[in-house]
Each structure stands twice: as structure tokens, then as C-alpha cells.
Amino acid sequence: MKDNKIIIFDKKEYDISKITIGLGWNIREKKPNFWSHYFFDDETDFDLDAIAFMMDKNDRVNNLGNDLYLTGKRKVPFQKSDVIYFHNLTAPSGNLGAYHDANQRKIEKTIEKFIENGEFVIHTGDNLVGSSNEENDAEQIIVIPDEIPSRISKILFLVCIYKGKERAQHFGQIENAYIRALDAKGKEMARFEFSGEDSFDQKCSMSFGELYRNDNDWAFKTNISTYDTDSFVDILRKYIRAATVHHK
């Protein structure tokens, strides 16, 4: 596994009024055989979910938000919390379902409105199939550094394969994977690529990197750790003070 690397963002070179963390990946081409034709569903898409944990100087997530109960008594956890994921799209307001049935242009307009309204971390929506297209990352999380409250010192970025265990999917089946950081003008400030390592086999969750305060500036560090679990809640337990957390 590659060594962690640190990048200090130079304000003279980059516009860091907005930082976008972009994730990209492709699914490795499968090689069908006689038995897989009869016993395996090779057409099941990989649903990778980008997640961010906002932490204090002691690497703790302090605000777990609230549960929201939808029709049918379905519980949606971590509303208005320091955990950004597909059901808690922004901080501080949450904005559950903000992109429902929206096309790309409408999503972009919605994100612009979020920034105008003071949201300081914004998930751009769930991608179900992946992409390593240079023009369009598969998923992005946008950070507005000047709006981040002082209680938050670090943001850890992760990705989990939704129902990875149930579908027998893991990171060893993914290729052309990368994480990158873009400035407000779309200029790439940092990029790290990783694929094809044996250590990724059977792993369903992974931390990619972290954005953290570096005196009066911001820096980015790769932080690649893999996990057997396909639930970010299991990983979150490492970073909370409370004895009990919600379940996805």
C-alpha cells in the first residue's frame, strides 16, 4: 500500500476558497465462465458511497445529529450531523433528498444555492456505477474552508461499497481508482491513484484522505486504510465519544 503523502495548499498558486474532493473508479472487467453464468449475478452494479467525518483536534466526531422518521417508520440517522453521506448531504443543514429527480444542471444550481446559504460541506449526490472520466468525478464532496467552524480541525473522507458483503463485492474488483483535490477554479492540487493491490481484496470500506488545518492554512494527506465492513457506522465508532451510535 502506498505511503501517506502530505500536500500543503499554497494560496499563491491555488484558490482555496472552495476545495473539491473528487473520487473516481471503474469496475474491473469481469471474465465470465461456465459456473458464473448459472450461479452469479454479474450484472449487479457497484454502489460506492462517498462519506466524510468532520472531527475536532482530537480526531473525534462530536455531533451525531438526530434521527428522522419517514413514512412507514423508516429511520434516517445522522441528520444535521458531522457525518456527511447520501442522507445527510450538507453541513450544517442536512438537506435530505435535495437532489431527488434532479438533472445535472439542477443539481449544480442547488449546490450553488447551498454555498450561498452558508453550507460548508456539500455532498454532490450518489453515483451508482462509478467513473474515472477526467471531466466528471464519480462523486464529489465540496468544502468551503472559510465557513468551517473552528471546532472542526479535520475532515476524513471515506468510501464504502453499499451492500458489499451481501453482493460479494470488494475493492479488489475495482480499477483506475483515484482521489484528487481541486481548487475553486477546478485546478488539480493533489492526486493519488491506487488500484490492483492485493491488500484491497475482500475489503468493502476504505479511508482515502483527510483535509486538515495546518496553522492558518489547510493541507491534505492521503490516509488509505481498508476495512472488512461495508458500513461506515462501524468505522464511525472509532471516532465518537458516545457509547452508542445509530445504525444505517
Image (spheres, rainbow, N blue to C red):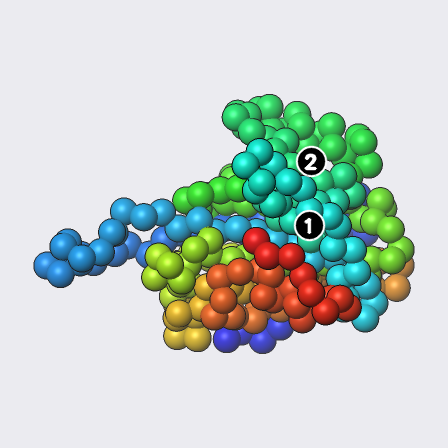
Q: CA distance from mark 1 to mark 2?
A: 12 Å
Q: Secondary structure at mark 2?
A: loop
Residue 234 position, x and y percent, is 58, 66
Q: Which residue is mark 2?
A: 95
Q: Amino acid at mark 1?
A: Phe
- The residue sitting at 18% across, 57% down in the picture is 39
- The residue sitting at 14% across, 55% down in the picture is 38
Q: Is residue 174 left or right of residue 75?
A: left
- The residue sitting at 47% across, 70% down in the picture is 228
Residue 216 position, x and y percent, is 89, 59
Q: Is residue 123 left or right of residue 128?
A: right
Examine the rendered structure and indicate whether residue 215 appears above or below residue 80.
Answer: below
Examine the rendered structure and indicate whether residue 99 appears above or below residue 129.
Answer: above
Q: Is residue 195 left or right of residue 36?
A: right
Q: Does residue 10 appear in the picture of this structure?
A: no
Labels 1 and 2: the sequence-earlier one: 1
Q: Secondary structure at mark 1?
A: strand
- The residue sitting at 57% across, 33% down in the picture is 71
Q: Nearer the viewer, mark 1 or mark 2?
A: 1
Examine the rendered structure and indicate whether residue 150 appears above or below residue 138.
Answer: below
Q: Which mark is residue 78?
A: 1
Q: Which mark is residue 65?
A: none
